[in-house]
Image (tube, helix red, strand yellow):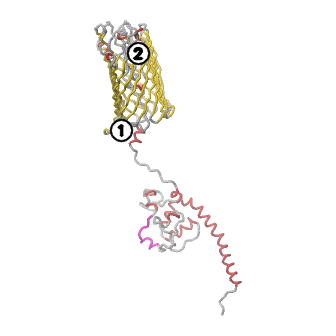
């Protein structure tokens, strides 16, 4: 009996099987489409999915049709979601194999076997036990496909010291924290970068001795400093040689030019605290003229500031300062050229204040004390000009109220009260120069990110003297400070101050002085920068016919070989026109030196 099936039956059976597959296609397509549409719902409803995965087989049989929409599950076989893990991770040991694919089919056997690793064990997806989606306390929820494919979560740890300092030390120090110190007019002021050149009034410290930090160098050439506990010390030493056409800064046929030798040392200190701040900067130099020894002189300036953050709205500001300089021979206070050597003078003082913020309203109160001491001068005939009667103390109180319209603009009103008391009640000319002053100003502080920081104020000041022969002085007040970063390579600084300074000229109550400085620094290369600047001085002596107008200009070039060695060259021109012939002068100074940052 033949077992061969006729060809017609084979073709018919083939057609029957093909027809069965075609009949299953309409059924499988809706099921596949339903599974794809159900994936977002599965990702959002993790509670239902986790309950299904952790439930017994009968619960899984009831939950699977509702969640997947593919009909009843096989008895004793819980369904596993097709979207529990990516295909590339299956079989790697990180995820359990789906049941029915070689895995155990008995739920009891699966529960008694060793616990299988899940995606929740991975550090990237480890979550707290109390997160929604956990079936029981201490059981982590299995992440969805959407979470598996998303970017890893951001790691948020405790703030580092640098981040804390950035957030807590962004308070801008009051640009006029330093009160008006009545220094004598020792020469035409120079822009800020010439601080410590050893020249008369080299820092432009005509009315104050605020030390502003220099424009930072490129990070690749910036000095690292010396770490000392929570402080960083930045020492530096500069040795220069050059030429000065008029070291005495005097007019007429008396000027004697000379070779100039300058030695300068400086030290900067800053704190590395997460809150509050302490900064200090000191510079001292000695300028020697071999061909004119009488003109050799020292120069020093320094300041230290501390900000104490009591809480979010209260802070305490402390400051100490000092200045050592010399008077020019052509000064009217020295008899306009009668002295043979430049006498020294020193001013030093301190400020303490508190600032409180009431939402947008800022109130600050600061008290200050400053002292000025003068050295006697020697005349050509051997006599001495006594200047001890110019020694005096100044006590000041400053009250300021500002309202923050926006983070960029804060208008303010300010009142400054001060009194000046001399050590000698009556000077050598029989005058009592003790006086009281008051100044009222209105202005605004502007801070446009890190691009522009400025403070401008204007008003009136009045000073009355105890001696009736000295008339009162009423004069306008105009103060401005601006730091503008034109570009990452160019920075502009401007400073202007006005005030009434003390004088010993007979018949004059005081001298109304106005000084303005402007500097522009541009980095030609990462280690090469050029600085151009100019300054203007105007002094009017009240009660006498003495007027002085001065101007200075500077060009400086800094080339840094590395972090600790730099080459510096500068040219300075200064001129002063006065109604006193011997006070009028011109001077040219050229210096070339090497700067070392240990």
Q: Nearer the viewer, residue 256 or 364?
A: 256
- Whether residue 436 is visible, yes or no, is no
Quickly name the residue at label 2: 500
Is residue 315 within the magenta segment? no
Residue 542 at what x, y percent from top left?
A: 42, 10
> Which of disc 1 and disc 2 is earlier in sequence?
1
What is the quadrant of residue 187 in the picture?
Answer: top left
User: Mark number for residue 273?
Assistant: 1
Number of numbered labels in the structure image: 2
Instruction: Tell me the residue at 67%/73% (across/down).
Output: 23
User: Horizontal and vertical percent for residue 533?
Assistant: 46, 24
Residue at 46 percent of width and 25 percent of height: 555
Highlighted range, magenta: 107-117
Q: Residues within 10 Å of mark 2 (few under 14, many from 20)?
A: many
Q: Please tell me whether residue 334 is drawn above or below residue 285 in the rendered image.
A: above
Q: CA distance from mark 2 to mark 1?
A: 39 Å
Residue 331 numbered tag:
none
Helix, strand or loop for disc 2: strand
Quarter occupied by residue 472:
top left
Residue 353 percent across, percent down from the top left: 36, 27
Classify the position of the C terminus by image quarter: top left
Q: Quadrant of residue 161?
A: top left
Q: Position of residue 237 (x, y in %)?
A: 34, 30
């Amino acid at each position: 009996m033949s077992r061969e099936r006729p060809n017609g039956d084979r073709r018919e059976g083939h057609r029957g099987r093909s027809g069965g597959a075609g009949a299953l296609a309409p059924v499988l397509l809706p099921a596949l489409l339903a599974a794809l549409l159900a994936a977002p719902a599965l990702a959002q409803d993790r509670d239902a999915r986790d309950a299904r995965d952790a439930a017994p087989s009968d619960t899984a049989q009831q939950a699977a049709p509702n969640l997947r929409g593919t009909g009843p599950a096989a008895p004793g076989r819980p369904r596993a979601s097709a979207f529990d893990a990516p295909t590339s991770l299956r079989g790697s040991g990180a995820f359990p194999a789906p049941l029915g694919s070689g895995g155990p089919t008995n739920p009891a056997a699966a529960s008694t076997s060793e616990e299988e690793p899940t995606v929740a064990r991975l550090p990237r997806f480890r979550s707290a036990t109390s997160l929604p989606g956990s079936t029981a306390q201490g059981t982590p929820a299995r992440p969805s496909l959407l979470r598996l494919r998303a970017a890893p979560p951001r790691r948020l740890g405790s703030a580092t010291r640098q981040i804390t300092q950035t957030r807590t030390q962004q308070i801008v120090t009051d640009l006029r924290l330093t009160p008006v110190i009545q220094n004598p007019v020792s020469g035409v002021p120079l822009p800020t970068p010439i601080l410590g050149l050893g020249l008369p009034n080299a820092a432009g410290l005509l009315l104050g001795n605020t030390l502003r930090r220099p424009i930072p160098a490129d990070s690749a050439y910036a000095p690292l400093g010396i770490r000392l506990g929570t402080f960083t010390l930045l020492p530096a030493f500069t040795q220069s040689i050059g030429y000065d056409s008029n070291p005495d800064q005097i007019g007429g046929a008396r000027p004697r030019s000379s070779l100039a030798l300058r030695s300068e040392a400086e030290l900067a200190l800053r704190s590395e605290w997460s809150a509050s701040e302490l900064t200090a900067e000191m510079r001292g130099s000695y300028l020697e003229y071999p061909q004119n020894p009488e003109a050799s002189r020292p120069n020093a300036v320094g300041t230290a500031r501390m900000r104490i953050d009591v809480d979010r709205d209260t802070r305490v500001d402390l400051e100490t300062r000092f200045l050592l300089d010399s008077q020019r021979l052509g000064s009217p206070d020295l008899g306009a050229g009668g002295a043979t050597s430049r006498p020294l003078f020193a001013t030093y003082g301190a400020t303490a204040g508190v600032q409180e913020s009431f939402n947008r309203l800022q109130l600050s109160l600061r008290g200050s004390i400053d002292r000025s001491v003068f050295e006697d001068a020697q005349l050509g005939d051997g006599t001495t000009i006594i200047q001890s009667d110019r020694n005096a103390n100044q006590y000041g109180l400053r009250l300021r109220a500002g309202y923050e319209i926006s983070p960029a603009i804060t208008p303010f009103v300010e009142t400054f009260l001060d009194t000046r008391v001399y050590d000698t009640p009556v000077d050598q000319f029989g005058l009592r120069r003790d006086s009281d002053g008051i100044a009222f100003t209105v202005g605004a502080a502007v801070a446009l990110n890190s691009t522009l920081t400025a403070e401008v104020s204007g008003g009136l000041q009045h000073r009355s003297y105890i001696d009736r022969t000295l008339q009162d002085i009423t004069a306008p007040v105009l103060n401005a400070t601006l730091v503008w970063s034109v570009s990452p390579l160019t920075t502009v600084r401007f400073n202007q101050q006005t005030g009434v300074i003390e004088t010993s000229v007979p018949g004059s109550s005081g001298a109304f002085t106005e000084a303005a400085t402007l500097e522009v620094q541009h980095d030609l290369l990462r280690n090469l920068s050029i600085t151009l600047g100019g300054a203007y001085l105007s002094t009017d002596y009240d009660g006498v016919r003495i007027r002085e107008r001065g101007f200075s200009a500077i060009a400086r070039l800094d080339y840094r070989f590395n972090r600790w060695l730099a080459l510096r060259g500068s040219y300075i021109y200064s001129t002063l026109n006065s109604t006193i012939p011997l006070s009028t002068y011109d001077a040219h100074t050229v210096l070339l030196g090497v700067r070392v940052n240990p």
